[in-house]
Image (cartoon, rainbow, N blue to C red):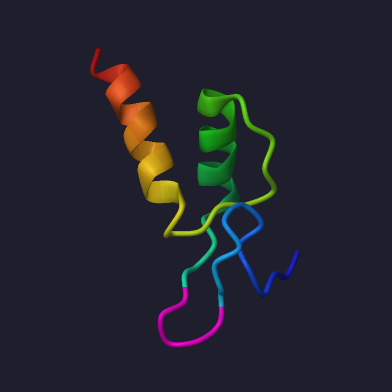
Amino acid sequence: MNYDRCPNCNKSLNGFLSANLLLQSKVDFINKHLNENKDAYCTSCSKPLLNKIAQHFNK
């Protein structure tokens, strides 16, 4: 799949202040641990999601 914008947060994936999509293995990891079914996440919107997962493991 080729996206111009992140399917999760709609951030631009082109240009100077753009984000990049995560590898599929990281997308699968986030979907599994947050019970989501998103096609992709970018480097911008994935940070709070990964922090949320990390907090769960730190309990």
**Quarter-of-image position of residue 27:** top right
How many badges with numbers are in the image?
A: 0
Up the image or down, 15 lies above or below 44; here it is below
Q: Say whether residue 51 is left or right of residue 58.
A: right
Residue at the far front: name it: 10
The stretch drawn in magenta includes residue 17:
yes
Q: Say whether residue 30 is left or right of residue 58.
A: right
Up the image or down, 17 lies above or below 55; here it is below
Q: Which residues are magenta?
A: 14-18
Image point (42%, 87%), residue name? 16
Residue at the far right: name it: 1
Q: Magenta residues: mostly which secondary structure?
A: loop
The stretch drawn in magenta includes residue 31:
no
In the picture, which quadrant includes the N terminus?
Answer: bottom right
Residue at the far bottom: name it: 16
Q: Say whether residue 59 is left or right of residue 17.
A: left
Image point (50%, 44%), residue name? 26
Q: Position of residue 4 (x, y in %)?
A: 67, 75
Residue at the far left: name it: 58
Q: Say whether residue 16 is left or right of residue 37.
A: left
Up the image or down, 49 lies above or below 46; here it is above
Q: Position of residue 34 (x, y in %)?
A: 53, 27
Q: Position of residue 53 (x, y in %)?
A: 38, 28
In the picture, which quadrant includes the C terminus?
Answer: top left
